[in-house]
Amino acid sequence: MSVRCYCLIIALYATWPVVGNTSSDGGQATLLPPYKDDISHRPATVDIGVISGRRQLVVMANSKVIFNSTTGWNKTAEELSYSLRMFVFSQHTGQLLTERAFNTTNHPQSMAVHPFLESLANGRILVVGIKTDALLNLPRVTRKFLQNMGLSSYELLLYRNYMAGILSVGGKTIAEATVYDSTIMTTGLYGTPVMIQATIPLLPASSCSWLSGAWSPRRKFCSEFDGYGELCDCDCDTPAALNWTPIPLPETTLQGTPLLIIGGNRPSSLYRCIMTVLGQPGGTKSHTLVSLDGRYPEVIALLELLEIPYVIHERPANKGKDVGLRISTHYLFSLKEVFRIFPDTTNAIVLEEDLLISPDFFNYFSQTSWLLEADESLYCISAWNDLGAMHTSRDRQKLMRIETHPGYGWMLTRTFFQEVTTEWDTLHQEHDWDIWFRSPQIRRGRECVIPAVSRSFHYGITGAHVNGVLTLAHFSGHIVSAQEDVQFETQSMLQPEYEKQIYAALLDSSVVFMNSTLHPCNKAYLPKNFTDGVLIIGFEMLTAEDYSSWGRLAGCNGLWNMDSRGHHNGLFRFTFYNTTVFAIGYPFSEYSWLIPPGVHVIRTMSGKQELDEISRLVSMNRMRFRVPDLEKFAPALLLQKANPAPEFVVIT
Ligand SMILES: *[C@@H]1O[C@H](CO)[C@@H](O)[C@H](O)[C@H]1NC(C)=O
Ligand SMILES: *[C@@H]1O[C@H](CO)[C@@H](O)[C@H](O)[C@H]1NC(C)=O
Ligand SMILES: *[C@@H]1O[C@H](CO)[C@@H](O)[C@H](O)[C@H]1NC(C)=O
Ligand SMILES: *[C@@H]1O[C@H](CO)[C@@H](O)[C@H](O)[C@H]1NC(C)=O
Ligand SMILES: *[C@@H]1O[C@H](CO)[C@@H](O)[C@H](O)[C@H]1NC(C)=O
Ligand SMILES: *[C@@H]1O[C@H](CO)[C@@H](O)[C@H](O)[C@H]1NC(C)=O
Ligand SMILES: *[C@@H]1O[C@H](CO)[C@@H](O)[C@H](O)[C@H]1NC(C)=O
């Protein structure tokens, strides 16, 4: 078995530069209390036992119960505990390092299995078991991956069949048991439970460079946790760096501009995010601030190890209730902190822990930040285009103005924050901060600048408001630019210039008005390769929030269809493959007078049945709107590729 030596990020985007000083490893021992690991007194073996079945999943290590999900005859509890579960033990101490449950009836959770397995350091002891069922909906790509890791039962395993397995990550299978029972498919019963037990020799510390070397923060961290790829990988010739040499961004205007990362208890996501921030030109530790919404030991240990500055917003006792209010309070706290800690900055950039950033992320903000000072009709610059799916955005130099606040990597000014702080401080009712943020009394007619091709990628499989189907339908197909030195033409984002530009495009003699009676879901409705001019589509829109007809056009064509985000005065701009489209909301849009009389305008959906049908279609967006030349660059897991070797997009 070859030495698997790539880190989390590399596994997703092979061309992302990950730069670091690999020769020095921490060395800040005095910052932390002395750590006593008992490597010298460690046991020689660990005994692991697993029971896997319909009503029981139990994992024991050295006779200690590590996990016990026993639901007996309780049908409700059983339904709630459907899972594929994984437990990771240290190969040196036999201690449990991390565990994860995947509800594989939920497709995107199945897709999260693979990245989790990729994030484990070589040599770890991995224990896998099934409670009730894990095979319904398990994607072929995940099944293959488990099989390739050494769990051969996944080749044949059926619905409601059970298995238990123990293996060394990147090494051999230690034990595996399964009972194949194909009668389940016809009888609807459950397979026979299985049980295995294995005594596994532990490895001496000398088998691992970082473990046997001098005491170090990395050694402490990696003895307790896993899920960080080569950060803790013994076999790797060049373990992930702890010290990044910042890559300077030439002619940056961002000197002193801090990057705030909003985080929770998702340490491996946060690690991925930080890796991409520090690996890009313009990213520095000293201007990064992580704000956590609670005191999470693993996350704090990670940030201490990486020496990233952080602040903690203590969680109120009534956790779980009023999720929106809690998030909003945390955002408010975080923004106050970033402007307090960086007293001289006029701007700040805000990220969330489940975002990855592109190589020209800082370059983009550096070139556009002046607009916030120069144009009072702007209140943010964002790295994200809500309509920036693979098949609807291609021009990485294009910028736009929109009325909504897309978030996902955005810049605001201290002045604007001061303006809204007083009102924000008074919000004590449950609310969504982002909806409040784009409400008329806060926005006051102002807009955000966005790129057509996003400069951030939303990696989260699930979040407070983001569920699996949504992720798959709307986020997984986004593309991100890979080139570092894109030059933007920013002058035309000033309000008067922008209007001139829009009118010039709309009044150009080459524009063509869509006058089709076909349903927008009809494959023949929207041409993919109309390049003779701008195609203008009219649809009914009564207010800025009315998306009853936009939802039809957008839902049918793989665009964000769940509200009216991403428009400018009722105008939505996107490219459908090679066709440049301007969609005008009639009569709300100030450009609606341009639509000639007698041209068909898309009307509101006919009712619940059509809405349901469109929702069903949307869940298949990634399959419906294939773009072969870009797909190989997208985070391929979510596209169900059998052997993902994705890279970053360089659009030529
Ligand atoms: C790496 O760090 C060491 C110690 O801080 C330093 O001497 C060395 O020059 C650095 N190497 C690079 C490539 O930056
Ligand atoms: C697991 O929990 C069940 C129910 O609480 C209990 O009956 C059973 O003995 C436990 N199993 C082990 C191995 O502790
Ligand atoms: C069955 O399990 C559910 C969920 O854990 C629990 O709420 C319920 O009280 C249980 N019912 C019985 C009869 O034990
Ligand atoms: C698992 O996912 C399925 C499908 O999304 C859902 O119906 C079920 O409630 C989930 N179970 C748990 C315990 O979350
Ligand atoms: C878009 O244009 C490019 C370049 O002309 C061409 O290679 C590609 O096939 C076109 N795509 C579609 C869907 O028409
Ligand atoms: C799209 O148009 C371009 C330029 O006219 C042409 O080269 C290309 O072959 C077309 N692609 C398709 C799929 O029709
Ligand atoms: C649009 O198409 C309809 C037929 O569906 C036709 O009657 C009408 O004249 C067309 N409008 C224009 C402006 O061509």
Image (tube, grey):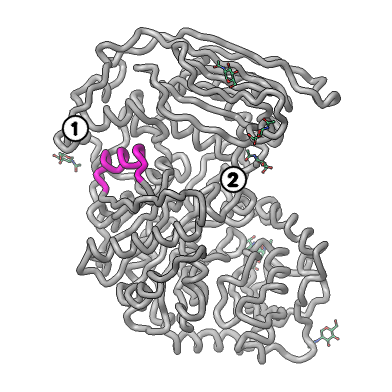
Q: Is residue 18 above or below residue 440?
A: above
Instruction: Identify the image quadrant of residue 40.
Output: top left
Do the CB atoms of the residues marked 2 and 1 lie less than 8 Å apart?
no
Q: Which residue is mark 1?
A: 33
Question: What is the x, y in percent for residue 593?
Answer: 66, 92
Q: CA distance from mark 2 to mark 1?
A: 42 Å
Q: Return the residue at label 2.
A: 638
Q: Which residues are the magenta region? A: 295-308
Left or right of residue 310: residue 621: right
Residue 298: quarter of image? top left
Q: Nearer the viewer, residue 561 or 330?
A: 330
Label 2 CB less than 8 angstroms from ligand 4: no
Position of residue 76 in the picture relative to residue 68 (left or right) = right
Seen in the picture, residue 44 relative to 318 is either above or below; the reply is above
Where is residue 475 shown, x and y percent of the image?
A: 57, 55
Q: Name the residue located 64 percent from the left edge and 54 percent from the top edge.
A: 473
Residue 142 is one of the magenta-drawn residues: no
Q: Amino acid at mark 1?
A: Pro
Badge 1: few (under 14), some or many (20 or more) residues near its Cα, within 10 Å? few
Residue in the foreground of this view, choosing between 56 and 7: 56
State left or right for residue 554 relative to residue 62.
right
